[in-house]
Image: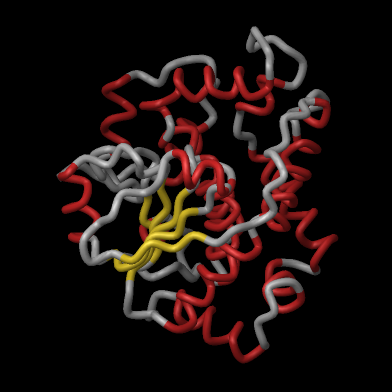
Amino acid sequence: MATPPTASSLLALAKTDVTLPIPKETVYAVLASPPFVYIPGTFNTRDLGLLPVPSGSPSIRPGFAFRTASLEGLAPEGHDAIRALGIKRVFDLRSMKEHRTKPDPVVEGVEGSWVAGDERDAMEDLSGFVEGEGEKGYERMYLDVMRMYRGSLREVLVHVRDREGEGFMFHCNAGRDRTGVAAGMLLALAGVDPDAITLDFMLSRVGTEPAREQLLAFAMRGTGVTSVDAPGFYNLCSLKVASWERFVKGVEREYGGWEGYVTGTLGFSEEDLEKIKKNLVAKE
């Protein structure tokens, strides 16, 4: 059995320019290794409990929390794979339009969950992504996710609090942005090392590689640009460590951190918060 890739090698691969392909033999080897999980008919699927963390850092327990891209193209074998992973509930983090246009398939034995959020159109303004590496735009976009999808994020945490014996999965379209915010929240509440959380964010560059060209074309249509050289577009489509770090600072400024968001905005009690944290963390 091949040795799983290290955190440093994964991060180096995740820094590959989004306009350039990752060699197939490289990306397929990584996608067949933890923390990635193969589910036919979707992509960018990971077990948050298999994320490499530094020695001594807490981690989410394996087989409990999974993130992925959209499931509307799920193959029959994908249904089997989801059940085999022990997943009992799938959270759809998409908008009403996305949810209705391309609904999740019904997977036997698996409950679906979707909560209506703020139906304002997703931000298409590239102005915040022009400067630097787009940090300002990412901070604003992800803070918007925390506001617009707070109902869905709350339901995910209710599941963690009340159904710790049932594995769950959550997704948006590419499993990158809204899904990335949800994953960052769960990892932070579990006390995972900040650098490992940043790595999880960056790994969507690798996880979306099989659909990279389609996603770039989708982003061009959504923003109305005709070239990847349009001001801000490249930064919007690129994942950078600095962008995630800027967002985390925004969470601290706006909410006093993730725990403040969970208690102050999502309405959980301190007792709830402690149970959520306890249920997430792998037992030593």
Q: In this rendering, would 116 be left or right of 262?
A: left
Measuring from the top left, give residue 190's x and y in whole percent: 53, 71
- At horizontal 78% and vertical 44% (from top left) the residue drawn is 140
Q: In this rendering, would 109 be left or right of 66?
A: left
Q: In the image shown, does 91 or 194 lie closer to the viewer?
A: 91
Quadrant (top left, top right, bottom left, bottom right) of the N terminus: top left
Image label count: 0
Residue 73: image quadrant is top left
Q: How is the image coloured?
A: secondary structure
Looking at the image, is 48 positioned above or below residue 279?
Answer: above
Measuring from the top left, give residue 115's x and y in whole percent: 55, 61
Measuring from the top left, give residue 124's x and y in whole percent: 72, 30
- At horizontal 72% and vertical 36% (from top left) the residue drawn is 123
Q: In the image shown, does 165 or 3 lie closer to the viewer?
A: 165
Looking at the image, is 210 positioned above or below residue 272?
Answer: above
Quadrant (top left, top right, bottom left, bottom right) of the C terminus: bottom left
- At horizontal 53% and vertical 15% (from top left) the residue drawn is 19
Q: Is residue 284 visible?
A: no
Q: Is residue 85 visible?
A: yes
Q: In this rendering, would 194 be left or right of 172?
A: right
Looking at the image, is 131 positioned above or below residue 150?
Answer: above
Measuring from the top left, give residue 218's x and y in whole percent: 54, 23
- At horizontal 53% and vertical 63% (from top left) the residue drawn is 187
